[in-house]
Image (cartoon, rainbow, N blue to C red):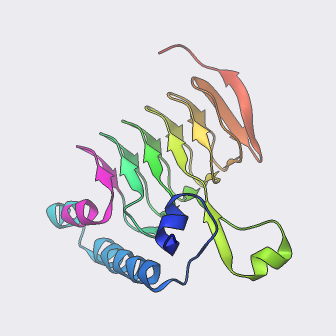
């Protein structure tokens, strides 16, 4: 029989109140608090905390505090990634971010979701879908990236967008729901 964590990581319905998962979220929140409370000049301290917290932190990557996450170990950053102030990661499943991707302030990544059926939702079971952000993607401030979304390399997401479906490579997309506005120059 699968543990609740195994169910969570495989995208199945699981119980978030499971003691192991609760302990892992508390650990993440403790590290996030230390990170967010560190002084601006304590770059080495902050880098060390991110290295403990995240599943992968590529060389030269940075997340401006404050930021928030559920587990941390499901956040996988390539090299040279930059996230501005107040980003939120509901990283129940992986949020994989390609090299040199950038996100403005208040960008939110939601892998967590809930059943559509009200009776099933009332059981407090939830599930998740991974998010993939390609290399050289730029996500404008206050955008929301919904569960299961993939954003192709070099694309730009306009500020305030709600990305509910995959976005191909080399486009500018914006809106609620986010849609392709136009293609942009090649690689």
Q: Position of residue 37 (x, y in %)?
A: 30, 77
- The image shows residue 104 at horizontal and vertical percentages of 50, 49
Q: Is residue 86 above or below residue 129?
A: below
Of residues 116 and 98, which is closer to you in this image?
116
Say if residue 90 shows up in the picture: no
Find out whether residue 124 is within the magenta segment. no
- Left or right of 20 in this view: 8: right
- Left-right relation of 171 to 180: left
The outermost residue toward the left is 44
Query: Is 115 on the left or on the right of 117, as rendered?
Result: left
Residue in the image at 28% along x and 77% along y: 34
At 55% from the left edge and 48% from the top edge, which residue is drawn? 131
The foreground one among 149 and 18 is 18
180 left or right, relative to 26:
right
At 67% across and 34% down in the image, what residue appears? 173
* Corner quadrant of residue 98: top left
Q: What segment carries the magenta color?
A: 48-63
Residue 64 seen in render: yes
Q: Which residue, as the protein is rendered here, is positioned at the far front?
A: 1
From the top left corner, tell me how far across and down residue 36 is, in percent.
34, 72
Location of residue 173 with respect to 105 vertically, above or below: above
Q: Residue drawn at (44%, 46%), measured in percent from left and top? A: 96
């Amino acid at each position: 029989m699968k543990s609740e964590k195994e169910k969570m990581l495989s995208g199945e319905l699981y119980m978030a109140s499971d003691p192991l998962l609760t302990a892992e979220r508390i650990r993440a929140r403790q590290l996030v608090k230390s990170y967010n409370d560190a002084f601006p000049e304590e770059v080495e301290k902050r880098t060390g905390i991110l290295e403990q917290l995240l599943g992968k932190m590529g060389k030269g990557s940075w997340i401006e505090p404050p930021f928030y996450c559920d587990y941390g170990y499901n956040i996988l950053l390539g090299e040279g990634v930059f996230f501005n102030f107040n980003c939120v990661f509901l990283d129940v499943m992986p949020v994989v971010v390609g090299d040199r991707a950038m996100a403005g302030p208040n960008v939110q990544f939601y892998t967590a979701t809930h059943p559509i059926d009200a009776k099933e939702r009332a059981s407090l079971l939830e599930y998740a879908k991974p998010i993939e952000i390609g290399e050289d993607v730029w996500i404008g401030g206050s955008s929301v990236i919904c569960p299961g979304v993939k954003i192709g390399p070099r694309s730009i997401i306009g500020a305030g967008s709600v990305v509910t479906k995959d976005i191909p490579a080399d486009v500018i997309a914006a809106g609620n729901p986010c849609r392709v506005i136009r293609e942009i120059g090649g690689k």
